[in-house]
């Protein structure tokens, strides 16, 4: 049995390498490394036309929506807070289309940080645009504890209180349709959300790719492999 193919979203930004200085499709290397360490094959998905999202998803066994820029508040009917970052409209449109396609096709889905927030927004939820205490310093990954909700998919993967790598200033406010909170920080912030079975859709607010624990990503990869065997 070959390793399941896991698509990971990327973003467009200006970058410099060698003699070049131009727009590039970027993704921090820890994302595909974590997919590989968890038993999957990673393929990078640069922003594209939303109309082709279903075609792309149909070729995947699983989907990871990566972290990054704040979701534009208009997506959930809010005015932007002064502390909300600049919009990434093309990326929002593309990733929302990927999420919709994955949910419609039953493709296992993992949202990481922004990806969890976008999953919530895709299902009609809203976001807290700013909270303190979840960023240690600019450009520095912090750590804090998260507590699983018993009986959830997340708790089946990580049953104990875990210290996780974190870097975010936004969070889930009102949950989207069908989503349940499956982990919380000590201050009550929702740290993981999921859809009920038989769907396999999980979002985590932290950055598992920046830590050593592969259990969340391994859960996605195993779900993708199981789906491929049916």
Image (cartoon, rainbow, N blue to C red):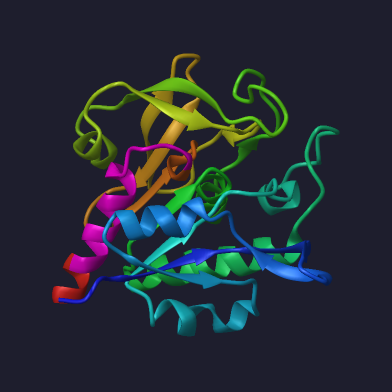
**Residue stretch rendered in magenta on the structure:** 210-225
Which residue is pictured at 26% across the width and 65% down the height? 224
Q: Nearer the viewer, residue 158 or 128?
A: 158
List x then y, in percent, for residue 67: 58, 49
Q: Is residue 104 magenta?
A: no
Residue 39 drawn at (x, y percent): 26, 60
Q: Let me know if residue 7 appears in the view.
A: yes
Q: Residue at x 43, y 41 (%)?
A: 208
Relative image position of residue 136 (x, y in whole percent): 64, 22
Residue 220 within the segment the image draws in magenta: yes
Q: Nearer the viewer, residue 58 or 25?
A: 25
Spot the residue most to the top. Answer: 187
Compared with 228, 79 (above or below) is above
Up-down relation of residue 105 to residue 164 (above or below): below
Is residue 206 rendered to the left or right of residue 219? right
Instruction: Return the x and y of residue 127 as percentages of the image width and height.
Output: 62, 38
Could you tell me which residue is drawn at 75 percent across and 58 percent down? 88
Number of on-image labels: 0
Q: Main secondary structure of the magenta part?
A: helix
Check the picture and name the quadrant holding the N terminus: bottom left
Q: State which quarter of the image contains the C terminus.
A: bottom left
Residue 230 visible within the image: no
Name the image quarter holding residue 221. bottom left
């Amino acid at each position: 049995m070959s390793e399941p193919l896991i698509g990971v979203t990327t973003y467009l930004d200006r970058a410099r390498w060698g003699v070049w200085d131009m727009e590039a499709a970027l993704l921090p290397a820890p994302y595909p490394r974590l997919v590989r360490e968890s038993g999957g094959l990673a393929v990078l998905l640069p922003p594209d036309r939303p109309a082709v999202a279903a075609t792309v998803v149909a070729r995947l066994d699983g989907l990871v929506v990566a972290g990054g820029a704040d979701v534009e508040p208009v997506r959930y009917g809010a005015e932007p807070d002064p502390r909300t970052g600049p919009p990434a409209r093309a990326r929002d449109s593309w990733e929302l289309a990927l999420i919709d396609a994955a949910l419609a096709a039953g493709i296992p889905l993992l949202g990481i940080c922004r990806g969890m927030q976008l999953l919530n927004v895709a299902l009609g939820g809203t976001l807290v645009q700013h909270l303190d205490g979840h960023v240690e310093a600019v450009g520095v990954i912090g750590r804090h504890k998260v507590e699983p909700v018993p009986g959830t998919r997340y708790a089946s993967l990580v049953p104990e209180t875990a210290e996780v790598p974190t870097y975010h200033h936004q969070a889930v406010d009102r949950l989207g349709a069908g989503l349940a909170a499956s982990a919380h920080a000590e201050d009550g912030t929702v740290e993981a959300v999921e859809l009920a079975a038989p769907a396999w859709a999980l979002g985590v607010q932290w950055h598992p790719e920046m830590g050593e624990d592969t259990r969340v990503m391994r859960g996605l990869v195993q779900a993708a492999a199981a789906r491929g065997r049916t």
